[in-house]
Image: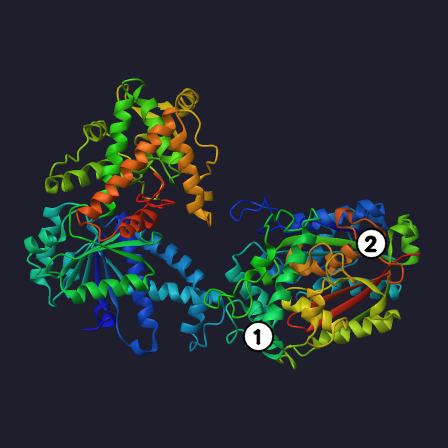
């Protein structure tokens, strides 16, 4: 069965979720594009959008339609060629509308797992719960009328173990998209010891057709992305906790968030990133990873405390940010949660004092956006870090320490053979986390 | 002609432009430009009739029947004649010649001409469908997604195949640089806020056929613009009526109009043959030669069209347009400055207004009102020339101007 045949019947599990909807969108477009090729005329393409939440499916279809519209507008030049034989489609608008119809006709929203039993490919993007995933894989595998391949979007659970528990005989691959899948370029591909090589080839071809950047990761809990992020976040949490000896909790969180965003020139501060991913999600991923780690305790009681207080971050259905460590207005942090008082304190009331305590960032500082666009980042960063290392204020010192820890985490991933090279670690941080420079560098 | 006025050319490039935020609409632009002219000429009572130039508001804005906006500009225009004309991107100059014919026929002494277009109401990908109406509808299916860029990309390709790739590409980049540098001197220009340092580096970028067309990049293209331009076309009698000094007026010495068959492909894609005829007619009508032309407003909807215009006018030999541009003749310090406020690429291209904008620019230049964009005209070259083109060299109007004496 070749690539195009495989893609004639596909299911996405958890299709209405944040990750599932993006994977569904990309797959639907790829399948529709295949169906439009002359050699595939007359073939049927089925993409089951399976989600237990029936109420979420209409919203999913609306999301799909709006996203396919955007995609169609972008590739109008190619679409005019694809529909060249259709004499009834003359304007761009007619062609775009036809394409939206053609993509949506591939998709079949459903709440029934039975719908997936004819699929050759199962994309799984459900809750990060090993037992649940195992149960569903096993059920599909036992009832399927074909011999399906499974692709899981897990960001932390070892693939080989899931495969074994579900009895999939090497038909499971980790294909870890980043959020949101429609936009983020990175896909981590995680092959277990016994994963069938044809499945790996298929996933690589698919990722290439979706114009993704593939980074292979070893099958170790957390892989490269969370392997770095969870430790980096934990370092930030510990640094903030250490600061509470001298400063209030909100001041400490503010300072570490500011250092990680501004001094390190990252797209967002570490507490904002934890909020973005979700405090509960971060805590859960740590708990999934922790049993596999030796000499290391990946765990934060602060995260537990936040969750207990019902402060979890994450995103609303429309993609807007929920409040977590930080409170957001129009996507920008405006206040910080005080775990002791259980209320938010406005940033404006503590900003001035904290900034004065931290001291100035290096004079050569430029914002993340400008650094991303800088063609000669290397020269800039050398100078920037040299300056920061020579500075004596607390902000610069914390930042240099943070950058060193971030590098150390990256190097450890390579040393532990989770990542196959320094470049792979850097690529994950550059493309999956939008950092302007990789953590493994010569600047720090 | 007297009392010219341009609104801002609104669209990408302007700091105040945001595609998702509310902006002035068709009627706002009409009112702004129309009222500004009325104020300069002493009110609506001076006006005998109004001529609107609008290409296709019926699709960009679901608004036809533009003539009915004359009394909306000023109640004083109520019950006076008003007409809207259309000739695709050549609409503006068509409005001017319609007014001129009325003056010549003595059915009016003062005609208010308002050109207007509001195009940012739809995304470029759909705007391309609308603008494709300037071509033959039966050709749309076979045409490029970006229909007109596709047409002129074909011309650019034919030109480079005939005369070599490198020099025309350099000249197109140079044309872009001139356009932006001129636009930076004109506060109403769409590229007025452009601060890019290396404009040539933008202009020579390789075309991306996957996302756009084969032989043009985005910098080769005129802007998607909202805006209006207005001016009063008056007889000697009308000038007196408005109480405006001759030194503040330009005289129209002649104009030429030419039409090609819209259903036919260009006879020679490397040349603008209709433009050539229209310019020749304008020169004959005005009784001047190209050597007497001091400045030109040409229809650079694409950089390659600007280069071909230098050949169509006769400044450069066939195939030597790129040299003419690269030698600097068309720059603001050159022997014959072109498009001194940026042209369609730098100032903007609100299609139905463009021909009127050209007239306003020449009126400003010839009467010393061009502000920072003012050029010095040599006494032996006192004439201004405009070329306004509708479609792919289909409807072309060329006009010769001179400071009134």
**Which residue is under mark 2?**
B376
Pinpoint residue A59: horizontal percent, then vertical percent. 31, 50
Can you say which quadrant of the picture contains the N terminus of chain A? bottom left
**What is the quadrant of the C terminus of chain A in the image?**
top left
Q: Earlier in the sequence, mark 1 or mark 2?
A: 1
Is residue A147 at all visible to an observer of this figure? yes
Q: Position of residue B322 (x, y in %)?
A: 67, 69
The secondary structure type at the circle numbered 1 is helix
Please tell me in which quadrant of the rendered image residue B52 appears: bottom right
CB under 8 Å between discs 1 and 2: no
At a point 56% along the width and 67% down the height, the residue shown is B216
Q: Which residue is mark 1?
A: B157
In the image: residue A76, left or right of residue A185: right
Q: Is residue A189 left or right of residue A83?
A: left
Q: Which mark is residue B339?
A: none
Please name whichever residue, B245 or B236, is drawn nearer the observer in this view of the structure. B245
Tell me how many marks there are: 2
Q: How far apart are the alpha carbons under marks 1 and 2?
A: 36 Å
Which residue is located at x 37 percent, y 38 percent? A268
Q: Nearer the viewer, residue A373 or B2?
A: A373
* Left or right of B202 on screen, residue B41: right
Q: Crowding near pointer 1: few (<14 within 10 Å), some, many (20+)?
A: many
Q: Considering only vertical position in the picture, is A129 above or below B259?
A: above
Near mark 2 (Cα within 10 A), the count class, few <14, some 14-19 or many ≥20, is few
Query: Residue at 52% of width from left, 66% of height from top?
Result: B207
Chain containing the residue with disc 1: B
Do dots 1 and 2 share one subunit?
yes
Chain under label 2? Answer: B
* Spot occupied by residue B9 in the image (x, y as percentages of width and height): 65, 51
């Amino acid at each position: 069965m070749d690539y195009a045949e495989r893609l004639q019947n596909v299911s996405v599990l958890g299709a209405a979720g944040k990750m599932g909807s993006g994977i569904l969108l990309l797959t639907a477009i790829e399948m529709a594009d295949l169906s439009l090729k002359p050699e595939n005329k007359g073939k049927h393409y089925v993409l089951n959008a399976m989600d237990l939440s029936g109420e979420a499916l209409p919203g999913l279809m609306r999301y799909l339609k709006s996203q396919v519209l955007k995609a169609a507008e972008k590739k109008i030049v190619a679409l005019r060629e694809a529909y060249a034989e259709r004499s009834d489609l003359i304007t761009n608008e007619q062609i775009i509308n036809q394409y939206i119809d053609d993509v949506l006709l591939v998709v079949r929203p459903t709440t029934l797992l039975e719908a997936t039993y004819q699929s050759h490919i199962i994309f799984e993007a459900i809750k990060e719960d090993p037992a649940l995933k195992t149960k569903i894989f096993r059920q599909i595998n036992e009832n399927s009328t074909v011999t399906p391949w499974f692709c899981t979007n897990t960001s932390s659970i070892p693939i080989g173990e899931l495969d074994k528990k579900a009895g999939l005989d090497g038909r499971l691959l980790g294909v870890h998209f980043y959020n949101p899948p429609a936009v983020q370029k990175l896909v981590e591909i995680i092959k277990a010891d016994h994963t069938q090589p044809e499945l790996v080839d298929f996933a690589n071809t698919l990722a290439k057709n979706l114009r993704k950047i593939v980074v292979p990761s070893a099958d170790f809990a957390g892989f490269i992305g969370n392997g770095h992020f969870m430790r980096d976040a934990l370092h930030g949490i510990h640094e903030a906790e250490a600061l509470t000896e001298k400063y209030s909790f909100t001041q400490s969180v503010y300072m570490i968030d500011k250092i990680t965003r501004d001094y390190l020139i990252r797209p967002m501060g570490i507490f904002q990133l934890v909020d973005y991913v979700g405090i509960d999600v971060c805590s859960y991923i740590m708990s999934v990873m922790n049993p596999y780690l030796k000499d290391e305790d990946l765990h934060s009681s602060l995260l537990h405390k936040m969750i207990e207080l019902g402060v979890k971050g994450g995103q609303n259905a429309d993609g807007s940010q929920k409040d977590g460590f930080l409170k957001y207005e129009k996507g920008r942090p405006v206040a910080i949660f005080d775990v002791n008082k259980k209320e938010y304190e406005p940033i404006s009331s503590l900003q001035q004092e904290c900034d004065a305590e931290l001291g100035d960032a290096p004079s050569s500082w430029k914002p993340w956006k400008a650094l991303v666009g800088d063609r000669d980042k290397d020269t800039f960063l050398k100078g920037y870090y040299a300056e920061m290392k020579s500075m004596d204020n607390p902000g610069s010192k914390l930042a240099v320490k943070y950058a060193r820890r971030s590098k150390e985490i990256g190097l450890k991933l390579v040393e532990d053979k989770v990542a196959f090279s320094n470049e792979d670690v850097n690529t994950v941080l550059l493309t999956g986390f939008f950092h302007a420079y990789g953590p493994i560098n010569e600047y720090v | 002609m007297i009392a010219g006025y341009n609104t801002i050319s609104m669209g990408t490039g302007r700091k105040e432009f945001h595609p998702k935020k509310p902006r002035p609409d068709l009627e706002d632009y009409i009112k702004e430009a129309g009222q500004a002219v009325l104020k300069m000429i002493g009110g609506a009572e001076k006006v005998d009739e109004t001529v609107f130039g609008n290409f296709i508001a019926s699709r960009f804005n679901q608004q036809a029947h533009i003539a009915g906006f004359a009394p909306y500009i000023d109640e004083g225009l109520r019950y006076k004649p008003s007409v809207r004309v259309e000739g695709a991107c050549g609409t503006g100059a068509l409005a001017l010649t319609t007014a001129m014919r009325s003056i010549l026929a003595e059915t009016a002494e003062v005609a208010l001409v308002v050109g207007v277009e509001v195009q940012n109401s739809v995304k470029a990908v759909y705007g391309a469908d609308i603008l494709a109406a300037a071509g033959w509808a039966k050709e749309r299916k076979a045409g490029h997604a970006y229909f007109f860029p596709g047409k002129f990309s074909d011309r650019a390709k034919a030109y480079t195949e005939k005369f070599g790739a490198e020099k025309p590409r350099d000249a197109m980049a140079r044309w872009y640089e001139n356009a932006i540098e001129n636009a930076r001197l004109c506060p109403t220009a769409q590229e007025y806020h452009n601060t890019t340092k290396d404009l040539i580096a933008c202009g020579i970028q390789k075309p991306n056929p996957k996302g756009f067309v084969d032989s043009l990049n985005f910098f080769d293209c005129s802007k998607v613009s909202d805006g209006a331009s207005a001016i009063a076309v008056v007889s000697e009698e009308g000038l007196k009526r408005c109480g405006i000094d001759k030194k503040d007026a330009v005289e129209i010495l002649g104009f030429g109009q030419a039409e090609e068959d819209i259903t036919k492909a260009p006879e020679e894609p490397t040349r603008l043959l209709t433009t050539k005829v229209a310019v020749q007619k304008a020169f004959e009508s005005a009784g001047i030669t190209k050597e007497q032309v001091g400045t030109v407003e040409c229809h650079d909807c694409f950089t390659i069209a600007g280069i071909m215009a230098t050949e169509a006018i006769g400044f450069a030999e066939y195939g030597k347009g790129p040299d003419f541009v690269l030698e600097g003749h068309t720059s603001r310090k050159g022997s014959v400055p072109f498009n001194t406020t940026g042209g369609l690429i730098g100032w903007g291209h609100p299609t139905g207004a463009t021909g009127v904008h050209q007239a306003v620019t020449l009126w400003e230049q010839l009467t010393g009102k061009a502000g920072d964009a003012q050029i010095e005209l040599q006494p032996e070259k006192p004439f201004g020339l405009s070329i306004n083109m509708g479609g792919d060299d289909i409807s072309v109007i060329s006009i010769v101007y001179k400071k009134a004496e």
